[in-house]
Image: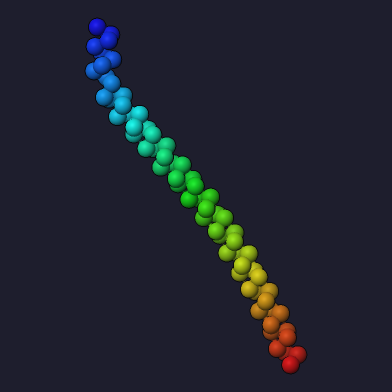
Amino acid sequence: MSAEKSKLNFPQNLKDSTESLESMCQKSFLKAMQIARQIFCKKVKKSMLRVKILLKYNDKVESRL
């Protein structure tokens, strides 16, 4: 009797495990995107800082001319 029950429950268990696997993949993908966004934002901020420094330097050089 227990063998019949496990056979009957197998498709539901498979569906549940597939859904939980999809959920895990979605969470992992979202986490990876969040990390990528953080890295990208840091790089953009550094680039913007460099641009500001170069503009300041350029203004000083132009004022001397």
Locate residue 30, reporting x and y percent: 45, 46
Direction top: furthest residue: 1
Location of the N terminus (image quadrant): top left
**Relative side of 55 to 32, left or right:** right
Find residue 26 and report its horizontal and vertical position in percent. 41, 42
Please tell me which residue is depicted at 61% across the width and 69% down the height of the picture: 48
Query: In this image, 33 relative to 4: left or right?
Result: right
**Image quadrant of residue 47?**
bottom right
What's the image's color scheme?
rainbow
Farthest-out residue, right: 64
Whole-percent x, y for residue 21 in the image: 39, 34
Q: Residue furthest toward the bottom?
A: 65
- Residue, x 69% and y 82% (percent of image)? 58
Residue 4 is situated, as x and y percent measured from the top left of the image, at 24, 11
Residue 56 sits above or below residue 43 on the image? below
Up/down of 41 relative to 11, above or below = below
Give whichever of 45, 32 is nearer the camera: 32
Residue occupying image coordinates x 31% and y 24%? 13
Q: Who's the residue at 49% across and 45% down the image?
A: 31
Looking at the picture, tell me which residue is in the foreground, 47 or 56: 47
Q: Quadrant of the C terminus?
A: bottom right
Instruction: Look at the picture and state if 56 lies above or below 42.
Output: below
The answer to whether 14 appears left or right of 45 in the picture is left
The image shows a total of numbered marks equal to: 0
In this view of the protein, which residue sits in the foreground, 23 or 11? 11
